Image: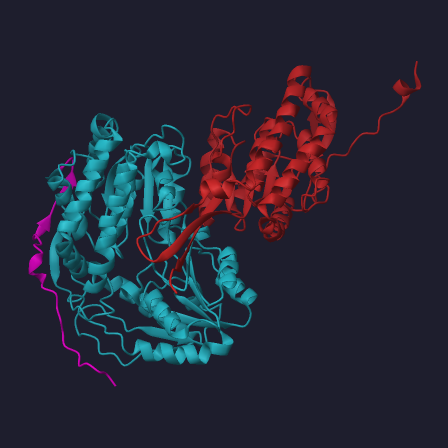
Chain colours: A cyan, B red
Amino acid sequence: MSIFEYAPAPESASVVDIRPSYDLFVGGEWVESAGERRYKSVNPATEDVLAEITEATAADVDRAVTAARRAFEKVWGPMPGRERAKYLYRIARIIQERSRELAVLESIDNGKPIRESRDVDLPLVAAHFFYYAGWADKLPYAGFGPDPRPLGVAGQVIPWNFPLLMLAWKIAPALACGNTVVLKPAETTSLTALTFAEICRQADLPPGVVNIVTGAGETGRALVEHPGIDKIAFTGSTEVGRLIARSAAGTAKRLTLELGGKAANVVFEDAPLDQAVEGVVNGIFFNQGHVCCAGSRLLVQESVAEELLDRLRTRMATLRVGDPLDKNTDVGAINSAEQLDRIRTLSQAGEDEGAVRWSPPCELPSRGYWFAPTLFTGVAQSHRIAREEIFGPVLSVLTFRTPAEAVEKANNTPYGLSAGVWTEKGSRILWMAERLRAGVVWANTFNKFDPASPFGGYKESGFGREGGRHGLEAYLDV
Amino acid sequence: MSERSERLAVRKTYKLFIGGAFPRSESGRSYVVTDAKGQFLANASRASRKDARDAVSAARKAFGGWSGRTPYNRGQILYRIAEMMEGRRAQFADELRAAGLGRNAATAEVDAAIDRWVWYAGWADKLGAVAGSANPVAGPYFNFSTPEPMGVVAVIAPDGPLLGLVSVLAPVIVSGNTCVVVASEPAPLPAVTLAEVLATSDLPGGVVNVLTGRRAELAPWLAAHMDINALDLAGVPAEDVGPLEEAAAENLKRVLRPRPEEWDADPGTARMTAFLETKTVWHPVGV
């Protein structure tokens, strides 16, 4: 079958230098926690301990917020936009200079394939800083009034699926608009955020403009509930998003949330099927399916369902699962044991509820957290695997007969983050795009991102947009 | 004495406005509305939780049709509302005077309310150009963002009985949202008269639903309702905002918090954009 034999092509890990333990980054300095608690961050592909990370206490968070407030009032708020811009350009450049190191570190810490961290995450991280750098001195032209003001101190909590990219999505627009930030990375993926702290120092960013506090849910709660912050930006689960929305109720804090999704990827009978198969694979197996906008429900028109699924199975059989640092790898490690449990539980529920499960023959490494690319057919809309976000490489297939039925099924979810449409007919693309209740619609493509392109959800996928001119609104007093 | 002054006036029954019809509250309840001096004016309907739910169903049912109208058509209808109000200036002014405004102030408020419909009518087919964009992405894709209505919006109207009401209502519906409005509790009568204007302005039934009654009774049901997408708390006193926002978090409603408003000031675009979603569409460019 295969034309070329497989040979491993691992990226060298020697380019990264991981310290045995990390403190907190507050006021431009590495500071020890007021508490004693530390936890181990592991490589999800090997379960080896990478480093000890500090679990920041409420007192630590308070210290970080105080540093951010001081920096906002004394330095960053009053600074002319053109000067803020130059700091952000510097950061963008340093990220480009260190992009190989950061990509390898991201793959080691997160488990994602090096091909993705190198070709997707890191270029987008640098581009995001570059893009918002340019806005810093052009805010009066953004359509939010002649002199839009920053909000103050932003508390930002980000997930583990795109650690450094989510940091960029949070920090770049916040700083461009003149805010200072306290950011908490996810507890399983803190290393690139801590390296970003070093980058801030290399850029001579004034102390306190960016503060990084590590920790888990308790640290995040201390941050979003801190009375000294003006803005909460959160990316993560809808469940936690709800808790944060409740905690911000009745306060003056501004809130933007980027939450879960259960996107429909709709394939019509006239679609170019091979392209659609690539799009479906990219939609659900990109980043192990750890993507809030993943195309986790495939809606395929009945007339081509069998043919599409045949081609999809053939394609899935060629996916390489394994070492994230191997440049051949398509699907890397699941980020944590906890997430692996969730994927297993929901997949089991799929079988129990009567859907038919299929995975290609796939040898998984003995250590680390792994899950084979999985396809469920015979899925009903009532099944848990059609309703709940699995956040793993698991695709649920449903069928439809008419465009109206496709719209009905695609929108039959409390989420509304993204959707995909595959058809050769232009008018049908626009007809579908109008009717899909989702913040991003990919037509004849999927999982594309760009700093100039607004991203964010409808309904329970959260509110506010990140990226583009629209992304500025989240950090301006408008 | 002239015959005219002896004639007994035919009073109006002030009812709810749900799905284009004027029902009484299903609960059979009403409450007394008085003028500024405490004199009896009318028994207004006191809407119940069930009325609120009916209103939400009507608004949801109307959403597809209203959001699917062309912006030009929505603009025409909003302008038609201004036309219909113009013909009832005297009636609105009388109701505002009963609510305590002086003669000149009442007339000025009615005129401003009519003009506000005209202002928003013109926005219908311009908002997309101002709030949307073609996004220059780094790749062979055409990428554009368009503003879209959120869906069903619950509006707790401020006590400015006419200009305040119009100022919160028009920006919600101009973009294609439908809504359930809780009218000013002490001065609900202009809201009911406005509903009569809406009913004769080619506005499809259910686009605007007006509830009168106890704000504190109705607002929590609306804030917690799972088929409402957004909440405008313009008329909510500061101490009630927290609990309503908490209830709204259950399905992550977008909430516009109350803030000090000068209703006769330039409205700007903020109240319109507060109830818009941004949808971004990608398509490859190629041959």
In the picture, the quarter occupied by the N terminus of chain A is: bottom left
| The image quarter in which residue A272 lies | bottom left
Residue sitting farthest toward the top? B1
Query: Is residue B57 in view from this perspective?
Result: yes
| The image quarter in which residue A199 lies | top left
Query: What residue sits 69% from the left and 16% below the top?
Result: B103
Residue A69 counted in the magenta span? no
Q: Give the answer, above or below, for where A57 lies relative to B260.
A: below
Query: What residue sits 33% from the left and 74% below the top?
Result: A374
Q: Which residues are magenta?
A: A1-28
Main secondary structure of the magenta stretch: loop
Q: Nearer the viewer, residue B128 or B208?
A: B128
In the picture, the quarter occupied by the C terminus of chain A is: top left
| The image quarter in which residue A369 lies | bottom left
Query: Is residue B156 in view from this perspective?
Result: no
- Total marks shown come to 0
Q: Nearer the viewer, residue A29 or A51?
A: A29
Q: Position of residue A187 (x, y in %)?
A: 22, 52
Q: Is residue B229 left or right of residue B43?
A: left
